[in-house]
Image: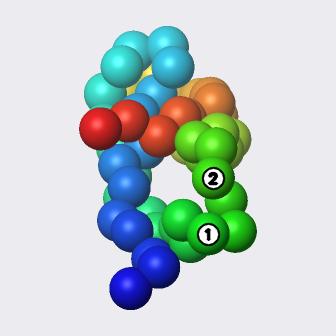
Amino acid sequence: MNRVIVIMECTKCKNRNYTTTRNKKQHTDKYRLKKYCPFCRVHTEHKESK
């Protein structure tokens, strides 16, 4: 099992909005994606949190 479920956290408001999966062997660093935050109501960068 190389895929892991990760939780994405907004960098502005710190709310955890999204879950996704990533491959641990191919992507060793943490994910940083630009997603829509419903609390901020704008597209912000979301980072992987624990």
Tell me which corner region of the image, top left, top right, bottom left or bottom right, holds residue 43.
top right
In screen coordinates, is 22 left or right of 43?
A: left
The answer to whether marks 2 and 1 mark residues whose Cβ atoms lie closer than 8 Å is yes
* Residue at x 39% of width, y 15% of height: 13
* Residue at x 38% of width, y 85% of height: 1
The answer for how far apart the CA atoms under marks 2 and 1 are is 6 Å
Q: Position of residue 31 (x, y in %)?
A: 60, 46
Q: Is residue 31 visible?
A: yes
Picture disc at residue 36: none
Quadrant into which the C terminus falls: top left
Q: Secondary structure at mark 2?
A: loop
Circle 2 Cα neighbour tier, 10 Å, few/some/many (<14 / 14–19 / ≥20) = few
* Colouring style: rainbow
Q: Secondary structure at mark 1?
A: loop
44 relative to 7, above or below: above
Picture disc at residue 25: 1
46 relative to 4, above or below: above
Tell me which corner region of the image, top left, top right, bottom left or bottom right, holds residue 5.
bottom left
Q: Position of residue 28 (x, y in %)?
A: 63, 52
Picture disc at residue 28: 2
In this rendered view, identify the residue nearer to me: 10 or 7.
7
In this rendered view, identify the residue nearer to me: 26 or 38.
26
Circle 1 Cα neighbour tier, 10 Å, few/some/many (<14 / 14–19 / ≥20) = few
Amino acid at the residue labelled 2: Thr
Amino acid at the residue labelled 1: Lys
Tell me which corner region of the image, top left, top right, bottom left or bottom right, holds residue 23.
bottom right
In this rendered view, identify the residue nearer to me: 35 or 32.
32
In screen coordinates, is 30 left or right of 12?
A: right
